[in-house]
Image (cartoon, coloured by chain):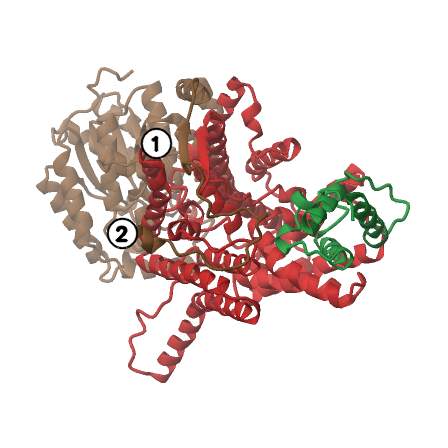
Chain colours: A red, B brown, C green
Amino acid sequence: MTIQSLEFFAFFALVLVLYYIIPKKFQNLLLLVASYVFYISISLNFALILLVMTLVNFGWAHYISRVQGKSRRKRLIIGIFFNTIIWLFFKLANFFVLQVIALIKQLGLPFNTGSMKVLLPIGLSFYTLQAISYLLDVHREQMPPSQKLVDFSLYMAYFPKLTAGPIERAQRFLPQLRQSRSLDNKSAARSFTLIIIGLFRKIVVADTLMAVIPRNFIQEGASFSLLEILIWVMTGAFALYNDFCGYTNMVRGISGFFGIELTRNFAHPLFARNFSEFWGRWHISLSSWLRDYIYFPLSRYLVRRNPNVKNKANIILPPMVTMIVSALWHNPQLSYLTWGVFMGVALAGERVKSAFRPVKPPSKLPLWRQSIAMTLTTVLGLGIPILLVTHFYSLGTLFQHILNHSPWTLPQSRVFLLILPGLWIDILQYRSKNETPFMHWAPITKALLLALAALGIFFFAQERIAEPFIYQGF
Amino acid sequence: MFLKKLLTLPNPTQRVNMKKTNHNQALDQPGVSLDLKKPFGITLLLSLLFIILFMVSSELLLRTKPVQEILPLPSVGSPNRSLDIKVHLLERLARDEGPPNIIFLGSSLANAAFDPTTFQVAFKKTTGKEIRCFNFGVNALTMTAGTKLANILVDLYNPEMIIWGVTPLDLSPRNKKKQLIIEQNHWVRYRNGEDNFAGWLADVSYSYRYFLRFRFWMEFPKLSFQRSRVVSKTTAYGFRINRTRNIIDNPVPPKRIDHHRRIMANVSPKPGPLAQLQKALAKHKSTAFILLDMPHHATLMKFYKKGPQTHQQIMGKIQSTARQQGAYYQEAPPPQLLEDRDWYDLTHLNHRGATKFSRWLGKKIGDAVNNKMLPEPGNREDIR
Amino acid sequence: MDENTIKEKLKTYIIKEIIKDEEYPLTNDEPLISGGLIDSFSLVNIAVFIENEFKVKIPDTELTVENLDTLDAMASRTMKELS
């Protein structure tokens, strides 16, 4: 079941009712059981892998904490290695399996290749990072290893965030499970609002925009003007943003009903004025993970070696390594690697500027310059990566079409009917510095907005029209 | 007790920074309690009222003639343009003038060939009876999909006659995906007894139908524009009036002829569609079904595997199915009725050809009515 | 060492090495990170400066807006580590 399906909401409602009926001391256990039921509904094998990783990391953290010095470090490295190897195996397995199948067929060997396939467990990339951050935090004595297997297992398997994050830190997540919390009117309203915003972004804005984008606008670039291609690329980027942000809003709202606050994952990345700011606003749980466990340690090491801010290695290496790791975490493919290098170069470029010239905060720039900066950052920070990742092998065709002067036409304006509502939500949130600004509005206005959102979600959630065939002549 | 021991490990000996929060400290009553106070849910209630208000008012408004005249035709969610157009034009006709006595059904061949107005005039001249007709020809309609539409038409409008233009190609669909487009439409499925939510919604809600139209425009703007152009050239009786081209002034390209040759050579009727036809004819006894052998351009006859013999064989099966179920079978018009100038291409008539054909058909059906071979339509009180 | 001394030393370092503008009127409560004056790399430079100058380490996971956005916050966090 997917997060936005009716089955999932029925499941959520059932768990929620049980959650508030049973004694408090069993609430975490209920959530854990529900999480595994959810995961098993996707795949029993995936659940088993998660269980093994949970038990190993739980025990290993204790194993790390029993010693000091070099042994402690050695155990940490083994722990990280274990998690990484599992993740790499599943990420790369299918690629290699396909090569093996091709080889078997080529050699005419008598093997049944029909069932040879390794599926990547959904959520593995996310909970692997969680496990690694947990081991690192324990190693650094920033937290003791968890004493409660139920709590730790819930940290790993918690169903709202299991499939696509946010990537939680144990330091933030686990204490919540041990605290006394309550679901009052305000928190219930906030959680509900987040769910509605999430559903609207995902179903009305993102899914529809994805359906509207022409399938082959890169491969058939000659039929589209440069401006149209740019609009479609940015539409795709906007759809991706609303899809992911919408998902995160939903799971945070759902989690809010259980009294558990999940990390905010997006903070209006479209209003970032430079790439550094962008990465502080986009997929925050991942970028902060990379910052805390790769960027900062590497930077500290380099700065200790040579504190000169203008040192080339200090400027280039940390952003480059971090963005390459980020790209490969998403997908170990050439297109993603190119994206990682591109972003690394962009971030390093910004560092060069501030290493040699007086810093001027973007907020102190004139509004028109900030607007240009926002537009450029969005196009280059979001549009180019989308292009690289989704159309890497068609880029040559695209450039050819551009150089051969594609016909100049104005882009279709219909996409703005969907972009504008999504953008409006972002603008409201940005200006009010509040994820749920609607909560402070008058009840009538809130109700009207909720009614419109609900109707929009309801209508757009119905099955899509199949693609028509072009009938010859008629 | 054992479980608790199993799940809790002993405290490790380690240096812990006492200033940091002890995550393992069991606080008083950890867990979440419900603390909802009245008033609760007022916004939800208000929004529900708004939703009801909006839905009721939009449903009422969107069913009025002035609003429907301004807006494009709504949609039942089918990517088949002509299905959407015909469903809604027929609805409007029934609303404005009353349900038709005779509905023409079939594929694009029927869409092109049946001119309701000319047929009505010829029929009246022969029988003296005033009737109302509608062309429900739908592009790419196969026999099976046709039976589904026939069920819907009888159910909704109870016509006295359905004249169904058929060809051997209707029994031998080539592209399964195309074939299923009509059959898999949620509204068609719903009206054929397959309950589904989207189908029910399309059936009862005009807001949803207009939303589907809006959505089609969003996703397929060029096709949406073409659809609007087709509607503007279609009469209230479902007949498209702008087909003036002919195969003398615009000869059929060789590639197209090859295409026909390939298709006709591979025509092989499947038993499934005939069985579906039988079922539909058996079900609807209150409506007189007339199965009509649609005219073909002479060139095409040669392309069948065994020439005209194949055509006769297959149409013979349709004829016997019709007779078994008490339906009427009408042979194709004589070849001399239609000349090259009457053909838009090798399969479809143009406007001139449609006029000639419809006039001939009106007289033929009129004669059959006069000779008591068909029940007399036009006795409904709602005919104006 | 008191908090004001820490603040002064930090201020001097930040104006000279990070902002690179000796005339800059940096106040104790000016938002440095959220205001865009300091990026994440500069934070590391500041953290290493604190390590070298005050002999305390602020963990990587604590180099955040919540802990170090202003001079006041930086000094307070450093004092916390010292004590």
Q: Dot 1 lies on which element?
A: helix
Residue nearer the viewer, B145 or A145: A145
| Mark 1 burial class by Cα count in 10 Å: few <14, some 14-19, many 20+ | many
Residue A464 tag number: none
Type of the residue with mark 1: Ala
- Expressed as whole percent of the image width and height from the top left, the position of residue B239 reads 37, 33
Q: Chain of mark 1?
A: B
- Expressed as whole percent of the image width and height from the top left, the position of residue A310 reads 81, 62
Q: Are marks 2 and 1 on the same chain?
A: yes
Q: Residue at x 44, y 17 (%)?
A: B39
Q: Residue at x 72, y 66 (%)?
A: A302
Residue B202 tag number: 1
Question: Total marks drawn?
Answer: 2
- Expressed as whole percent of the image width and height from the top left, the position of residue A373 reads 74, 45
Q: Chain of mark 2?
A: B
Residue nearer the viewer, B16 or B121: B16
| Mark 2 burial class by Cα count in 10 Å: few <14, some 14-19, many 20+ | some
Q: Dot 2 lies on which element?
A: helix
Image quadrant holding the C terminus of chain B, namely: top left
Instruction: State the residue lying farthest toward the left.
Output: B324
The answer to whether mark 2 and mark 1 are in CB contact below 8 A is no
Report how far apart the C-alphas of labels 2 and 1 lie in the structure. Answer: 31 Å
Residue B169 tag number: 2
